[in-house]
Each structure stands twice: as structure tokens, then as C-alpha cells.
Amino acid sequence: MLEKLLAWIKAPIVYVLRKPIIWFSKKVSTSPDREFVFKRLTEIYEDITQNPNPADGALYHLDMRVNDFIILSDVHKGNRKGRDEFRNAEKNYLAALDYYNEKGAFYVNLGDSEEFWKFNIFSIMQHNKATFEAEKKFIDRNAFFKIYGNHDLFWKIDPFSKMYLREIYDKAINIYGGIVVRVKYANGEYIDVFCTHGHQGDKRSDGSKFSIWIVAYIWGPLQSFLDININTPAVAKKEKTLHNKLMYEWSQQQKNLVLVTGHTHQPIFHSYSHIKVLKEQLAEAKIQGNQELIHELENRIERHPSQCTLGDAELPKYRPTYFNAGCCCFSDDSISGIEIADGKVRLVRWAEIEGVSQKEVLEELPLMEMYHMFFD
């Protein structure tokens, strides 16, 4: 009865506000701006690596050759009802965390872990006790790094966020805009693994403090209330592909850096062999006339960041500089992430097979091979 009453009250509000809000959304919505994206990524990276007391990040010296890591992004925890994209993927997420905790791995969460555009902190805390407990096991080992994204800016700006974190995890952990894991080698060389959400350059959620506050407390919740999504599948795909390309271009211009992000929900494993294999598979599919496979491979190649706007002559020597962890709320209830273990970096997928959550390795690259791509 109460739900029907609320729906009855909501209907005229939606009717009046929906069209003008959609118009305004399209008016202020802009594609990622290359200059601003590059500027923001550079600012965060330089602040972390050059400032002894970074404003919004941290530098860690950890050897990824002997320590295991799992990097996940975009969990979007909600209230386990219809609007919660994570509700059916929770089992795979918990299975993955249990597996990596048993292995003693470090866990890097790249942001948008909690869906504050749709749900409030109290609802999220109430319905995600199991996931918070699973994450707490990493915290107890000092092996958890939590980064904020555009959907959980709450952690960055809410004056009571530390209090809520203490209630959730029994301690007020740090929430970062990004972290850098510096892997040093005996010859004095190093590779910086720069982990951040990937929304940098979005002027609405990565602009001034006022615009960030508006997005976190008004704009996001309002769009959710009105059931507005101005990103149609075609528009969303175009925006995400452009964003991935910009991330790739920026990372290629840095020295000894690997950029790992989320945000676009498009898992990307960036090695030359990967794009080469995809193109070889496409050529074979065309010979066989397999239209379904051709379409799938063309989409995967299009999403690959090496298809960037730089001309071939402008590209520096190839280095595997950009990875995207994907998300933990795919429509098939699977999750994806970047795993570093056993001397390899891998793109992994966790999915339920015959009632059991299992890990699948989609792509992998030996860390030593990556090293030679940078320094040979």
C-alpha cells in the first residue's frame, strides 16, 4: 500500500520534471575533453609521486613479482532490489574475495564501490554487511586500498564519511583519488602502477568542489529518481570508447607507467599479443563467414585502446600501459578484474558455473615480458 501511495505521489513530479531535466542533461553533457583528462591525470600522478604529503593519494613500494594483487572496480553496491545492479553478482564477488584473501593478496578497489546516486548510506550499510565483512578481512591484514569514483564521491566530500567507515570496517580507512604502486628493479629502473577510477576529466564529477557536491547530492540522485539515462547504448559506447582511448594516449606518453582504471565497465587487457590475436581471429572468422563472431571481434577490437586517435608516426614504442578492470555488475552476473599473481598479470572473470562461482583467465601476460617491453 505504501509503495503504491509513493508511486502515485511520484508520478506527477516525474511528469513535470522529466523533460526539462533531460533537456538540461543533454545541454551540459559533454564528451571527455582530451586536454582536461590529460591535465587531471597528470596532476594526480605527479602529486602522488612528487609530493611527500599527497593531497589525494598515496605512493606504495610493493613488489608485484612476489605479492599477489586483485584489482576490481565498479561494484555499485545497492539495496538488493530491482535497481541494484550488483544484487545478482554478489555471490561471485564474495567468492572472489574469499579466494584472494586466502592467497594473502592485496585488494585494490578502484571506486564506484557503493552506488550513492541511487541509494543512501544507511540502505547501503544495511544490505551489504556480507561484502563489507569480506573486505574487512583485507583491512585486518593492511591489504586493502579503497579509491573513490564518480558514483561514490560521498566518501570524499561527506563530513561524516569517516564515522560511517569506522562503523562499517571498525576503523576509518583512507579513501584515495588514486594510488601508485612503485615496483623497483635491481638495476635502478622502476615501473609505476597508477591505479585510479578513471573519471578524471569529467567536469561534472571531477571539477570544482561545488560541481562535485552538486553531482553527489543532487544531480545523480535526481536522475535516478526520474529514471533518466541520457546515455543510450550507442552514446554510452561511443563515450566509453573515447574515454578508454584518452586513458591509453595519456599512459603512452608517460615514462615507465602502467595505468589501471575502471569507470567504463569495459575490461581491457592491453598487450600487443592480445590485439594481434583478436585481429588474426577476425581474419579467420571472415574467411569462414561467421557473421556473429565477426561482429563480436570487431566490437572487441574497436574497444581496444590501441585504436586511438594518435597517428602511427606519433605513437611511441609500444608498451602495455593501459588496463581496465571492467566491473562487478555485468548483466550476466559475472565480475571481472585485473589479477597479478604467479609472475603474471591477468584479466580474470568470475562467474557461476553449475551453481559454483569459478575463476576464468581471459588473458595473461608474464611480468618479465612486460618488463622487457618497457626497457629493452
Image (tube, rainbow, N blue to C red):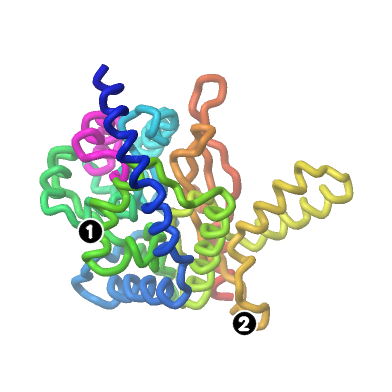
Q: Residue at x 31, y 46 (%)?
A: 117
Secondary structure beneath label 2: helix
Q: Which residue is mark 2?
A: 314
Query: Where 150 falls versus 31 (above or below)?
Result: above
The reply, left or right, for residue 311 in relation to residue 24 is right
Residue found at the very far top of the displayed protein? 1
Q: Position of residue 265 (x, y in %)?
A: 49, 49
The residue range painted magenta reads 116-139
Secondary structure beneath label 1: helix
Mark 2: few/some/many CA within 10 Å (<14, 14-19, 20+) = few
Query: In terms of depth relative to the viewer, which is nearer, 203 or 149?
Result: 203
Q: Which residue is mark 1?
A: 213
Quarter where residue 48 is shown: bottom left
Residue 151 in sight from this viewpoint = yes
Quarter of the image for the N terminus: give it.
top left
Q: What secondary structure is the stretch in magenta mostly built from?
A: helix
Mark 1: few/some/many CA within 10 Å (<14, 14-19, 20+) = some
Amino acid type at image mark 1:
Trp
